[in-house]
Image (tube, rainbow, N blue to C red):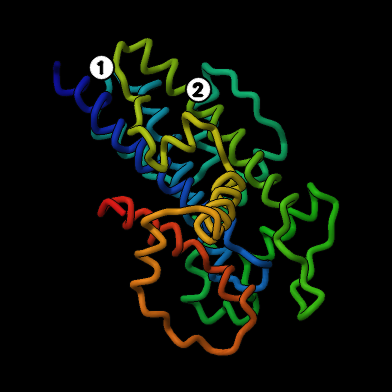
Amino acid sequence: MDRQTWWKNFSLGTELQISGSFIYNGLHQFDQLKGFYHEEEIFEFVYNLAVGIERLMKVNIILLEHNYDSDQEEFEKSLITHNHLELLKRIKRNNQLDLGKIHNDFLQLLSKFYKSMRYDRFNLASTYNLAPERKEFIDFIEKYLKVKISIDGFGATPNDKRIKKFIGKTVGKITTELYNILCESARGLNIHTYEVRTYSKAFKIFLCKDFTFEKENVLRRELLLYITNPKVESNFKFLLEEIKPLEFDGYHLNFYMSYSWCICRILKKAVHFGY
């Protein structure tokens, strides 16, 4: 295997894995949002998606455009951009992507965020433009879901199942279209760039094509119900009995249960040690 083939097969394969991880992390962050008030939470969501989709696009461009006659230095310079729509144009030159206005608008949001908004607060002028990524993102949701998003007090709009499915569907369409092109390109070059590690973050995104965390949330609930069921006998319960409980503050139990993802980690550790 020559150097260029190794690069496209293995180095770019790792980049695909990284891309999937960023996209996963962004969607997971969005699943954790209660509402749309905290701008740093929206920043984290948009940032991860912007990086993940950009890297996925660049893997595509290398597989589509690069050949043995390419000027390597000039080609690599052409990849130094964060303009998602320009990257998309390069991919679409000889490929059909079934993307509509909603997807282009979302990519424009990512591009605008990464080019300027992510650094806005380092400038004094940011005092006249508070939370730009939050405003742009809320505008996007309001435009396509025909809803009014409020961030004020007790009347704030919750990040409900409808909004989560909408974002998952939008991101999923973009991601799947790009991954399908990548698969075609890799197979045409007789390489395996499209392969991802089983049960990794990228596996959920590219192979399972699952862009919400609804299944994981149901599983978490069912696990809690199962391990707390008095009719179920399990050595895992002996482990729980050995753990001395902390003296929590007097919040309602629902408050603590909202952080119940930690139970899954305890369960995973218990299984590892043979309980």
Q: Is residue 231 visible?
A: yes
For the N terminus, the quadrant is top left
Classify mark 1: helix, strand or loop: loop
Residue at 37% across, 13% down: 187
Residue at 35% across, 64% down: 239
Residue 182 in the image: x percent, y percent?
Answer: 43, 23
Q: Mark 2 against mark 1, which lies toward the viewer?
A: 2
Q: Seen in the image, is 227 located left or right of residue 2?
A: right
**Mark earlier in primary sequence (2, 1):** 1
Q: Determine the CA span between mark 2 and mark 1.
A: 26 Å
Q: Image height check: is 274 above or below 17?
A: below
Residue found at the far left of this picture: 2
Neighbour tally class for label 1: few under 14, some 14-19, many 20 plus, Cα within 10 Å: few
Residue 37 in the image: x percent, y percent?
Answer: 67, 73
Neighbour tally class for label 2: few under 14, some 14-19, many 20 plus, Cα within 10 Å: some
Q: Seen in the image, is 77 located left or right of residue 2?
A: right
Disc 2 target residue:
180
Residue at 45% across, 45% down: 52
Classify mark 2: helix, strand or loop: helix
> In the image shown, does 20 or 77 lie closer to the viewer?
20
Q: How many marks?
A: 2
> In the image shown, does 238 or 198 lie closer to the viewer?
238
Residue at 35% across, 38% down: 17
Q: Identity of the amino acid at label 2?
A: Asn
